[in-house]
Amino acid sequence: LLAVPAVRWRAGVRARPNAAGSAGAGRGRLFFRAAAARPVATAVQAEQEDGEEEEEVVVEERYALGGACRVLAGMPAPLGATALHGGVNFAVYSSGASAASLCLFTPDDLKAETVTEEVPLDPLLNLTGNVWHVFIHGDQLHDMLYGYRFDGVFAPERGQYYDVSNIVVDPYAKAVVSRGKYGVPGPGDNCWPQMAGMIPLPHSTFNWQGDLPLKYHQKDLVIYEMHLRGFTKHDSSNAKHPGTYIGAVSKLDHLKELGVNCIELMPCHEFNELEYFSSSSKMNFWGYSTINFFSPMARYSSSGIRDSGRGAINEFKTFVREAHKRGIE
């Protein structure tokens, strides 16, 4: 998937619409195919549906995971990574970046803090307003992780911290993968190891079983404020998976017996409990060290970071569904 920035459309070369492009993800720009040789840009003949032939630019490049992918212009909305039309659309907002690239990781490469593939984004094709976007057509990405590299002005006094050496997490990522165990630093006692977002699957495998919001009137709520990890972490809870979403599910009947009909969760989105650990050897147990608001805390999941963080999403959904079954909002 290594895009070659020097490759540009030649005058007179037209882009052929395809399934993704016709659906709004943009017209074909580059092809990526498995090859042992160095990247070679060539113009090839491609037949349209109407029988006419036209030229496309093809970049042959060794693709680490095998198979073939096409890189298309993509769409500026919705923000985040979205599976659709036979591939994945990536869109991220940045008001001051002068350049951007999509960085892809295998789980093993993420642990080694090594980028597996990097796709530079062309501001003429992949930028709408302040949103950078790209569409990767193909099905080889779903077991990978992603982040972004931005270049721009480094001026802290103006709130600008662009640093091309850093790879940042998409604030709209649905799950974030980094350290697997709660309170345990990464390799080399690193409290801030490289993080990456989950690339979504085309279809959700979770069964909501017809669940709907309970919509109680505010005056009727009996609220229980819960720290999700602390609720079942102690041995006295006898939970099979203490300190997790599933562990909390096992205690919902107890809350119902108390007359509780609403749970107010303390932060359970992705945060870094070790934010200040290197300087004070203390953990932020409460969770007010936010990493991503839209990603369930992976270390509150019994599956941890396995399956690219999808287990954390499904366990959190299970917690919500089972609470609703018991009349708890």
Image (cartoon, rainbow, N blue to C red):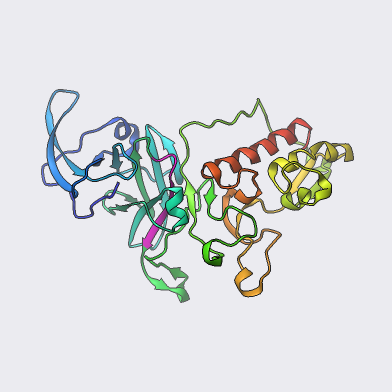
Is residue 88 rendered to the left or right of residue 21?
right
Q: Nearer the viewer, residue 71 or 133?
A: 71
Identify the residue shown where x is 64% and y is 39%.
315
Quadrant of the image occupied by residue 5:
bottom left
Residue 93 image offset from top left, x and y in percent: 43, 54
Q: Does residue 297 belong to the magenta stretch?
A: no
Is residue 77 rendered to the left or right of residue 236?
left
Identity of the residue furthest to the bottom in this view: 157
Q: Does residue 142 belong to the magenta stretch?
A: yes
Instruction: Please report the bounds of the magenta region as a residue range.
Output: 141-150
Identity of the residue furthest to the right in this view: 258
Identify the residue shown where x is 34% and y is 42%.
65
Identify the residue shown where x is 62% and y is 60%.
184
Identity of the residue furthest to the top in this view: 50
Residue 254 image offset from top left, x and y in percent: 85, 39
Residue 297 seen in the current view = no
Q: Can you say which quadrant of the picture contains the C terminus?
A: top right
